[in-house]
Amino acid sequence: MNKYKFSLIVILCLMLVVCFTGCGKEKVAHQNLPHVTEKKVDVFNKNKIDAFLEKNEPVEFKIPMAWPKPETVDAVDDQNEESVPEEQVNMTYFLFNDEVHETDLDGDGTLETWRITKGEEDDEYLYEAKVYINDELVEEVSDWGFYTNVIALVEFPNWNQKYILISDYGPSDDYLTTVISYSNGEVKYWYVEGIYENNTLSINADRTIVEQKRASILQTWWYYVTYDVTKDGLVKREEDFYEPIETDLWLWGSETKCDFEFYSKPDRDSEKIFIPMGAYVYFTGLDDEHWVEISYEQYDVTKYAYLYVDDFYIVDRNSEMTAEDLFEDLLMAD
């Protein structure tokens, strides 16, 4: 082999190495990363809760203020300790049993005695949670009843009111948290989806609680809802459309199985937009009542249209056409 051929082979090998090592380097934009991740704070790490259960004594952890939502996955790595504000949420864990605790729940300077216990067992798993304040049964909280073994007491910075959280795994990972407050002799409670143990519920020092809510139209998918913690309790931030949460396992898009007329606006009196069979559309938003926003490409231009959905997945009431009749490979989970 002469020197010329040898040099040519070396150059070709170097070119192949560069090509292959460059694959997969493109950044993937995630518009909806979780508000709290393991890289930001490990307080939600289940190992810590398990360790607490072994000790059988209250343990306090601090949760930093929610970080700004990054535009890319790499943006999380760019965060550092100096960017974490001083304000923190205090969370104290207690065993879910009949033990009595003393806490100034409403910030009036007086300690209340409180305990939360599982009521009588309905069947193999289901319970009612009974809330006692100053030795009086003030509320019975009943929903799924697949409660965890831990109760959390939440204290926001610069805020007198404290909140008790009860986590519920649900019958098929339908996560639910009961948020309980006590003030001036009155108990109030709210249900939010998600649980703090597995990071499907974010509790932030700016007095917001962000749930990962399961949508109730089109298919099985999720979106974030933010609640402001106020003197009147949890107040939901209403939005016209919610952006679905992106996952590593599922892209919210599909190919149409047939020709279909969508709406140009989320209004059934608006003009129709014809999209042919075989077009690929992305599901970019939902109001979780009737409307799904979709995007599609036409002549290299991104355009938007709207689908009206009735009774979870009926897209044409006249023909009783379902979402599965219109779209390929929707995610339909129990």
Image (cartoon, helix red, strand yellow):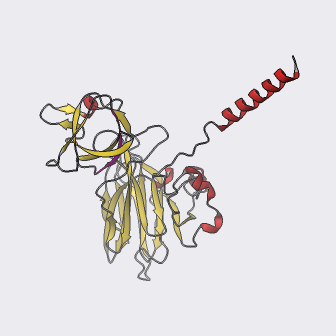
Name the residue located 24 percent from the left edge and 30 percent from the top edge.
Answer: 259
Highlighted range, magenta: 279-288
Query: In the shown orientation, is residue 68 left or right of residue 126?
Result: right
Residue 56 visible, this orientation: yes
> Residue placed farthest to the front in the image?
4
Q: Position of residue 50 (x, y in %)?
A: 58, 51
Q: Is residue 81 above or below residue 275?
A: below
Q: Is residue 65 above or below residue 117?
A: below
> Residue placed farthest to the left in the image?
318
Query: In the shown orientation, is residue 2 left or right of residue 100?
Result: right
Query: In the shown orientation, is residue 168 left or right of residue 82?
Result: left
Instruction: Examine the structure image and report whether residue 73 is included in the region drawn in magenta.
Output: no
Q: Position of residue 12 (x, y in %)?
A: 74, 27
> Residue placed farthest to the bottom in the image?
109
Quarter residue 207 falls in:
bottom left
Q: Position of residue 171 (x, y in %)?
A: 37, 41
Residue 333 visible, this orientation: no
Q: Position of residue 127 (x, y in %)?
A: 35, 49
Compare residues 105 and 35 and report the one nearer the observer: 35
In the picture, the quarter occupied by the C terminus is top left
Give the prevailing secondary structure in the magenta stretch: strand
Name the residue located 32 percent from the left edge and 28 percent from the top edge.
Answer: 278
In the picture, the quarter occupied by the N terminus is top right
